[in-house]
Amino acid sequence: MEIQVAQGVDLPAVQSKIYEVRGRKVMLDFDLAGLYGVETRTLNQAVKRNMKRFPPDFMLQLAPAEWEAMSSQFVMTSRRKRPKSSPPYAFTELGVAMLSSVLSSETAVQVNMDIMRAFVALRRYALGYAELKRQLDDFMATTNMQLSEVYQALAALAEQKREAEKPRKPIGFQRYGGSL
């Protein structure tokens, strides 16, 4: 299924700005500000004026240690975007949706729709991955059973070969050193 994206917004670029923090998919304030075309300070001021709209399941602030670890993974960390001493806010999918009501510009509304599409695409990907993993597990279980049967058949054949190669007791009369 093709996901429609607003003109000028790159869905993979949006998806690359979705991180996992404390087991939740989030976007950081400075990435969102860049997408909305506003300064991070402006976005955070709008959020602080409307804190009732951002409960803990909508937004969280990274702990300094989390931000330090996360920012060290960025290839191009820009101190102008966000100094490491000031941990960013992280917005869940619900928080990003709430931002469109706080930043009521036409750009904010359009970008929010694109971000929601990115979250949905990631969710679909994760569900597809889970289904693929289930199918692979089923395949492995079936293959293991078949390999077990092949192994048992080979073990039985090896046992038959060992039995066939054992020296046999002679059949019939044997003559013992005496003369007749």
Image: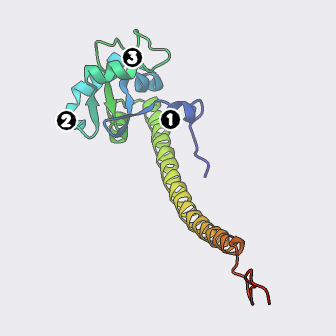
**Looking at the image, which is closer to me, 106 or 143?**
143
**SS at mark 1?**
helix
Q: Residue at x 58, y 32 (%)?
A: 10
- Looking at the image, which residue sits at the far top? 80
- Looking at the image, which residue sits at the far left? 52
- Looking at the image, which residue sits at the far front? 179
Q: Is residue 104 left or right of residue 61?
A: right
The residue under label 1 is 15
How crowded pointer 1 is (Cα within 10 Å; few <14, some 14-19, many 20+) is rated as: some
Q: What amino acid does circle 3 point to?
A: Glu
**SS at mark 3?**
loop
**SS at mark 2?**
helix
The residue under label 2 is 52
Q: Residue at x 36, y 25 (%)?
A: 29
Q: Residue 105, percent across and down? A: 41, 29
The residue under label 3 is 39
Q: Is residue 61 left or right of residue 24?
A: left
CA gap between label 3 and label 1 equals 21 Å
Q: Residue 139, percent across and down? A: 58, 62
Q: What amino acid does circle 1 point to?
A: Gln
Q: Residue at x 72, y 82 (%)?
A: 176
**Looking at the image, which is closer to me, 110 or 58?**
58
CA gap between label 3 and label 2 equals 22 Å
How crowded pointer 3 is (Cα within 10 Å; few <14, some 14-19, many 20+) is rated as: some
**Looking at the image, which is closer to me, 164 or 125?**
164
